[in-house]
Image (cartoon, grey):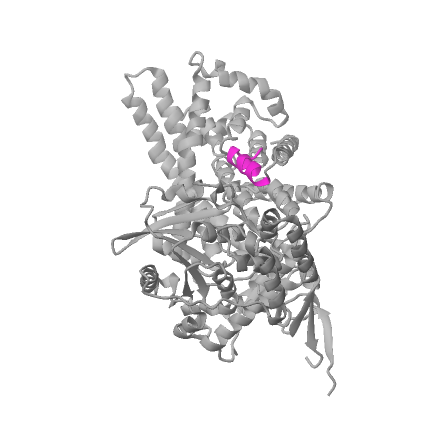
Amino acid sequence: MPENKLRISLSEMTAGQDATVLAFQGGRMVNNRLVSLGFTPGVLVNMTQNYGRGPLIVTVRGTRVALGRGEAAKIIVERGSNE
Amino acid sequence: MSDCHENPAQTASHLAVLDVDAPLIALAGQPNMGKSTLFNLLTGLNQHVGNWPGKTVERREGHFNLDGRTFRLVDLPGTYSLTANSPEEVIAREFILCEQPSVVVAVVSAANLERSLYLVAELAALDATLVVALNMMDVAAQEGLHVEPQVLEAALGLPVVPMTASRAEGVRELLGVVQEVLNGKRTLGPRPPEVRADHREVLEKIEGLVAAYVPAPYPQSWVALKLLEGDTEVARTMQAALPSEIWESVQAVLRQHDDAFLAVASGRYEWIGRMLRAAVTRPKIGQIGLTERLDRWAAHPLWGLFILAGILGLVFGLTFTLGTPLQKWLDGQIVVPLAGLAAEGLAGAPSWLRGLVSNGLIGGVGSVLTFLPILVVFFAAFALLEDVGYMARAAYVMDNLMHLMGLHGKSFLPLFLGFGCNVPAIMGTRVIDSRPARLLTILIAPLVPCTARMAVVAFIAPAFFGANAIWVSWGLVLLSLLALISSGGLLNRVIFKGQRSAFIMEMPLYHIPNARTIALLVWQRSLSFVKKAGTTILAMSLLVWVSSYLPDGNLNTSFLARFGHFIEPVGRWMGLDWRLTVALLASFPAKENAIATLGVLFGNSPKAGLAGTLAASFSTASALSFLVVTMLFIPCMATVAVTKQETNSWGWTLLSVFLLLAISVAAGAGVYHLAVLLGQ
């Protein structure tokens, strides 16, 4: 079976989906804060709440973190296509 | 990074009265780990809340006795990491490096070890003597997590004490271990994390470059690590300490590795992962947690707003129904008879002394102190919401609305706090990461009606509007919020050109509130109010009374009356006579002074009480205008002072004052003329 992975931004994930963090495209300050809350490349995240507009809640390393839509759009994640 | 001895006051502070040889214990931990609960448990009322020198970050310190020995305890600010992202993080690490506490107790949550050990990983690099308080064992058990403290202890190489601070379990054991460490009965062998393998070489290179130049007391390896992480404070210090050619080569290395902070962080999480694999058994989680179930409603974009509005309504309803009758009772049964009693007791004394004591002192300060029950109810409600974990939800659901002003959800928290008092609200803007967003929040925060202003409203509205007072009060709150949103939106476009900052916030688990934590919070906030009543409000009451008595003992020809008449033309636009205008001006030192001043100006007549006298003296339109202006007027003295301190600029402070002056005069005049037009 060929590897069929999908690269999207965190803000495009729907509630309940899992994905792996690949990279950050935000500024240094924002990245440092994301890292101290547990977002590092390779970590598994689960979208807890995303209504398509406004802020969203994502669970990372057992912590629920609220992110603005703009911040979430700058986190690139990868998820398997079979989900 | 700053020079350790730049600020000698830091060590002396309020613990100076204690034995300086008393061991110094520091509490470190991330937010929402139960650190404050533990601090309160250990110190009780033997604590002092102040500021870190030169900063406006809250500093809590205290002492406790154990087996006849006194210990000093400092609660470090709650931070997720020790990288210089915020003043709190710098304070925490500078304290540990400079003050060298005998023991640093790192509070972690057993229910969330993966995240909370991140700070321990950072602390381990500071060469501090660490004891790990493994808190929230009860929450971990509820979630079906099995954590083995002994295994974690062996893996970390640090003493680990399981505890549940909210139930006061494990505190004795923690203190026992701290004493063993102090007495050298426990040897520590911490194994701090390393950076990810692919960056070890570059870290060594940097350490080799800076080694000879690192100023005391900073550990070399820590400085190298922080440089690799891109820490701005450490970079500044080392730029000053290093010869320029070496700094250039350090910079060159760092430029090639600008993503190194990820390698450092990944190294820490790998280290944490090893600890967890050893110490935690996590069964397959099938059930949906309480937090998730509650958040389906509380964090829902629509229902969440309804719930927030309901909670706000409940808090104010409670404040009015519980606090107001108590306030009236205190006023009628204590203050008025006391003033009468004083007048009788001083019957033989000169009339100025009688007036000073019964009207100036008891009438002024007494009236203000009767508001304490109202404040206590509000503080208790607020502390409860804070402790339960609801506040993060309020910020989350308000994010969209805050975007109207170019702010995000976090700005809502200080604004919400502003309903209690604007001073902590402006200090609370520290949670906002970008300076423009913070300045904007500071500018609009005084438009949030604080309890002092609500107290004025609660006093005057029933006198004029009877049963409709509650609706008038709600209308006034809505008007203030409308003014807040529209001026926020306008300022954002005009001054800040529509910038926006990042919204990143932890949503803590809901938990059962801790009575002790809430009680102490209410106690501290009430105490500061009583202190204010004893100082600025007292001084102002006396000043108002004296200027209403001099030069000839007749109010209508007094200095105060003359000044009131002088500025009356401005007051007239808003339908205010000289007495209401003077009351408004006297509210600058403290908003509650408005009533105290009216109390002095009208003299506390024992029968009708001040409220009745006021209702007989002014039209409804004037009363409404007075209420509107009071709600929106220049921030109180304390708020202006803290604005200057927080913005560190007179320009912004004056802008804040003039902004509110303009808004209040315009709104007051508008409301007055509208009310007259409607035949009130």
Q: Is residue B48 left or right of residue B674?
A: left
Q: Where is residue B477 in the image (x, y as percent from the top left)?
A: 57, 43
**Would you say the magenta stretch is mainly helix, strand or loop?**
helix
Q: Position of residue B286 (x, y in %)?
A: 52, 79
> Residue B433, relative to residue A53: is it above or below?
above
Residue furthest toward the left? B68
- Looking at the picture, tell me which residue is in the foreground, B495 or B632: B495
- Looking at the picture, tell me which residue is in the foreground, B626 or B151: B151
Magenta residue span: B634-647
Name the quadrant of the C terminus of chain B: top right
> Residue B47, relative to residue B200: is it above or below?
above
Tag count: 0
Q: Where is residue B411 in the image (x, y as percent from the top left)?
A: 60, 50
> Residue B248, relative to residue A4: is it above or below?
above
Magenta-span inclusion, residue B639: yes
Q: Is residue B49 left or right of residue B461?
A: left
Q: Is residue B28 visible in this depiction of the protein?
A: yes
- Looking at the picture, tell me which residue is in the foreground, B230 or B360: B230
Residue displayed at 41% across by 51% down: B74
In terms of image quadrants, where is residue B619?
A: top right
Q: Is residue B432 visible in this depiction of the protein?
A: no
Q: Where is residue B541 in the image (x, y as percent from the top left)?
A: 43, 26
Residue furthest toward the bottom? A1
Q: Is residue B89 left or right of residue B515?
A: right
Magenta-span inclusion, residue B158: no
- Looking at the picture, tell me which residue is in the foreground, B392 or B228: B228
